[in-house]
Image (cartoon, rainbow, N blue to C red):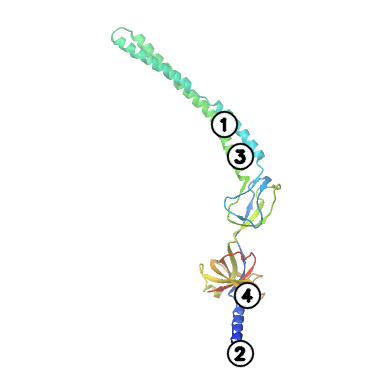
Amino acid sequence: MKTKLIALIILGLIFTSCTKVEEKADAYGNFEAVETIISAEAQGKLITFNLNEGEDVTIGQSIGLIDTSMLVLQRNEILANLRALKFKLPDVSKDIKVLEQQIANIEVDRKRTENLLEKKAATQKQYDDIIAQIEVLKKQITAAKYKESVQSKAILSEIEPIEAKLKQINYSIDKCKIINPTVGTVISKFVEENEIVSFGKALYKVADLENIIIRVYVSEPQMVNIKIGAEVKVLVDAPKETMKEYAGTISWISSKAEFTPKIIQTKEERINLVYAVKIAVKNDGGLKLGMPGEVYFK
């Protein structure tokens, strides 16, 4: 009797297990990730390229360098031209200081002559001559400043476009530095060191494999039961004919219907219209791109 009871329990467990395995999923799909192709922003020989497929990269990480030799030579030439032009800029400050000192000295004579004039010990002509000397010196200062301004403007008009060109060269040199712009894992590497690359050439591909998604397609009747932010259950094949479960969150739902993709359903079912849905899943390292999965809506 006891043996029969144990046998019935085992059969019941087997039946229950088979029922769970055969339970039909609400949706099927494949795992994918946000992929970013990093391209060259300059042209030349790839001097260094420190990168391997499967390597994790961070924002701002230095990956490599495109040859900057010619750009550096051009920058040095521009800097030399700038120094030569700036050397030509007039500087009348010393001359003006001399003239101002002369005015200060004459002012002493003017005050003394003014006192003597009040005492009838000097003539009006002497006083007027001193005033005239001061006016002449002031005009000389004004003329020197005007001449400096005119000459400076002429030279500065030559300097401005050269400085603009220098900024362009520095920008081009910066673009020769390959700096990684995103966090992720390198899944493809398209070039090697010492290759010649051109502007826009793909260098490598990065994907965020920690925050992976599974894209599934659901029918219109199923749409009423799902919404963005809802939690779902995601199952993938595991060893010994078991399934491994992951927690997923609906992150995106297509706003328009489309025909069921060929890779998802049978020929008869492909005539149906479905909606694409993306489900975010935290990857523990066991999920790979392209791996199939099943989704059960809660």
Asked if marks 4 and 3 touch (Cβ < 8 Å), the reply is: no
Disc 4 to disc 1, how far (Cα)?
77 Å
Is 202 in front, or is 162?
202
Label 3: which residue?
Answer: 169
Give the camera-side residue of 273 and 23.
23
Looking at the picture, which amino acid does disc 2 mark? Thr
Query: Which residue does the numbered mark 1 point to in the structure image?
Result: 158
Residue identified by numbered label 2: 3
* Circle 3: residue type: Ile
x, y (%) of residue 276? 58, 68
Q: Which residue is mark 4?
A: 242
* In the depicted structure, whether residue 62 falls above or below residue 21: above
Q: CA distance from mark 3 to mark 2?
A: 88 Å
Quarter-of-image position of residue 3 = bottom right
User: Disc 2 and disc 4: Cα gap in Å?
Assistant: 28 Å
Which quadrant: the N terminus? bottom right
Q: Earlier in the sequence, mark 4 or mark 3?
A: 3
Residue at 57% x, 39% y is: 167
Q: CA distance from mark 2 to mark 1?
A: 104 Å
Query: Tag 1: residue type?
Result: Glu
Residue at (39, 17) in percent of width and height: 104
Q: Is residue 219 visible?
A: no
Q: Earlier in the sequence, mark 2 or mark 1?
A: 2
Q: CA distance from mark 4 to mark 3?
A: 60 Å
Identify the secondary structure beneath mark 1: helix
On the image, which quarter does residue 88 sit in? top right
Amino acid type assigned to the residue bearing label 4 in the image:
Thr
Q: Does residue 152 appear to the left or right of 237 in the view shown?
A: left
| Tag nearer the camera, 2 or 1 | 2
